[in-house]
Image (cartoon, rainbow, N blue to C red):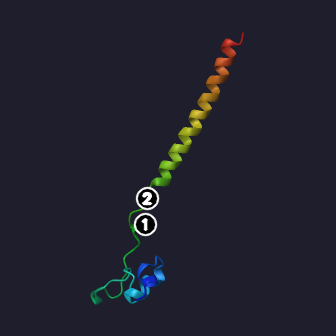
Amino acid sequence: MTRKERHSRSSGARKRSLGGNAGNEPRSGDDNGAKLPPRRKKFPSSIHNVYKWYYNLLFILFLGLVAFLFWYGNKFSS
């Protein structure tokens, strides 16, 4: 194995060095070729909900700031 193949970050070099088994396939023959679902599908992330709440909160705070500045301006402008 050359140095390039040993230290390469591409998956092609790893597949060649592992003999085509990159860890996605079961190693024992007892599973009848059944693959596990990806971790992302088995444990879905809820980070998009956190982003939605965060941006909605920022929008509400901005509207509150605008309303406060209009009120403050009207009250003390006379």
Name, please, the residue furthest toward the top: 78
- Dividing the picture into quadrants, the one containing residue 63 is top right
Give SS at disc 1: helix
Residue to which mark 2 is pinned: 45
Q: Measuring from the top left, give residue 27's x and y in whole percent.
A: 31, 85
Q: Residues within 10 Å of mark 1 (few under 14, many from 20)?
A: few
Left or right? Give the position of 55 relative to 3.
right
Q: Measuring from the top left, give residue 19's x and y in whole percent.
A: 38, 90
Q: Which residue corresponds to the image point at 61% horizontal and 24% vertical from the top-left?
A: 68
Left or right? Give the position of 49 relative to 73.
left
Q: Residues within 10 Å of mark 2 (few under 14, many from 20)?
A: few
Compare residues 35 and 65 and report the one nearer the observer: 65
Q: Which residue corresponds to the image point at 55% horizontal and 44% vertical from the top-left?
A: 55
62, above or below 5, in the image: above
Name, please, the residue furthest toward the front: 3
Name, please, the residue furthest toward the right: 78
75, above or below 38, in the image: above
Considering only order in the chain, which callout, 1 or 2, is on the residue closer to the N terminus? 1
Q: Which mark is residue 40?
A: 1
Q: Which residue corresponds to the image point at 38% horizontal and 63% vertical from the top-left?
A: 43
Q: Which image quadrant: the C terminus?
A: top right
57, above or below 23, in the image: above
- Indicate the amino acid at tag 2: Ser
- Indicate the amino acid at tag 1: Arg
Give SS at disc 2: loop
